[in-house]
Amino acid sequence: MSVASGAVSAPMMRLHDTPRGDVVTFDPGPVVTMYSCGITPYDAAHVGHAQVYLTFDLLQRRLVDLGHETRLVRNVTDVDDDILRKARELGVHYLDLAAEEMARFDANMQALDLLPVYGEPRATSAIPDILSLIGSVLDSGHAYVAGGAVYFDVATFPAFGQVCHLGRGEMLELAAERGGNPGDPNKRDPLDFVLWQPSAPDEPSWESRWGPGRPGWHIECSALAMRELGSTVDLHGGGRDLVFPHHECETAQSESVTGTTFSRHWLHVGMVGLDGVKMSKSLGNLVFVDDLLKEWEPMAIRLALLAHHYRSDWDFRLGDVEEAAARLERWRGGARGPAARDDDAVLDEVRRCLDDDLDAPRALAVIDEAAPTRSPARAAALLGVTL
């Protein structure tokens, strides 16, 4: 895929970092390692998913434009409570369900012109890595075995909360909402979280020194991130709903073993809603990318997402795509019009917008202003929009 090349003089990228709560300098080395939490493939990708992966794509494009080599890993959670429950309901093997939905997901992301990722490993590919990591957490004194499960002991990790900066009450509330099961009687502390758990009779199971079972939710991402990218990554992130418990727990279990920073920078994307409620598979209030692609050109869908700053919460409406389709036609008219001329100033201004916390809406406004008389093709290409 063609990506605009060349960088403005002495560029300085600034991105919001969740633990610091501010927009700060992001200045990685020549090779940038990034990890984005991927999907659990038990249903189609919705607009909220697309917003997250488009954000990482936009960041990757600008880093490549600046001359970096990017290594973006996006995992696939192909074994957890959700996919096993859905496979049970459908009467299919969970890996068959995962294969079907991953094929659809990959087709959706390709249609939206996302750059290829460095790696897309599956949780089930990492069972030996997961078992080894859990063993290390236990050996370091940060975990315990109870009721056939292995739990991380948050009392042994004083920095717990360093990513989310939430109070204990808020963490307990979110843990209950997001599958943390604080009422588990086997836990020493309600905030302790599962590293390994016994499997139900109809669930997949792997042998371990703590008994047969399957991984907890958080451990796979630590194992995969460290296997693919090393003990420290430059940037990690996903949807903002993953800050706690998922990313907090990832950090604790990783740093308890390595003794080093797990991620230098945390980037989180806002929530996309429908009628004022966050889109989620559990609520069923979803707008699927697959369905939008049946009615709209992929570039119009991409532009509709880019019209919202990645950190903002927003409600999807079909009018967003209609407006994006009209914008796309205006840009194309500018690119092909007899008065259009190539202009480095447009591209450089879009670069400055992206360097300012990936301000895509402002970048779109820059191209809107230029399109009547100057060709926006190269600036649009930097945003992944083909004219």
Image (cartoon, rainbow, N blue to C red):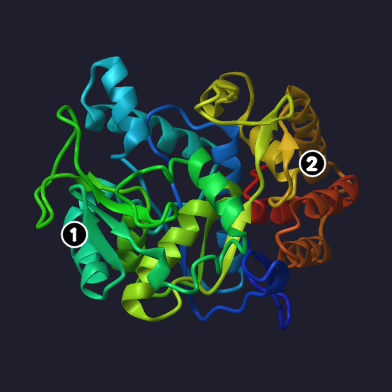
Quadrant in which the C terminus appears: top right
Q: Which of 101 and 376 is in front in this view?
A: 101
Amino acid type, mark 2: Trp
Can you give x and y, in whole percent of width and height, for residue 286 in the image?
58, 25
* First reached walking from the N terminus: tag 1 or tag 2: 1
Residue at 48% x, 71% y is 263
Label 2: element kind: helix
Q: Nearer the viewer, residue 184 or 98?
A: 184
Residue at 51% x, 36% y is 111
Residue lying farthest to the top in this orientation: 90
Q: Name the residue under label 1.
A: 131
151 on left or right of 368: left
Residue 280, relative to residue 39: is it above or below? above
Residue 91, relative to residue 353: is it above or below? above
Q: How crowded is mark 1: few (under 14 residues within 10 Å), some or many (20 or more)?
A: many
Can you give x and y, in whole percent of width and height, for residue 223 in the image?
30, 61
Give the CA distance from mark 1 to mark 2.
Answer: 52 Å
Label 1: element kind: helix
Q: Is residue 119 visible?
A: no
Q: Nearer the viewer, residue 287 or 82?
A: 82
Residue 201 quadrant = top left
Q: How crowded is mark 2: few (under 14 residues within 10 Å), some or many (20 or more)?
A: many
Residue at 30% x, 56% y is 151
Q: Does the CB distance between marks 1 and 2 fall below 8 Å?
A: no
Can you give x and y, in whole percent of width and height, for residue 206 in the image?
12, 46
187 on left or right of 200: right
Can you give x and y, in whole percent of width and height, for residue 121 in the image?
31, 52
Amino acid type, mark 1: Leu
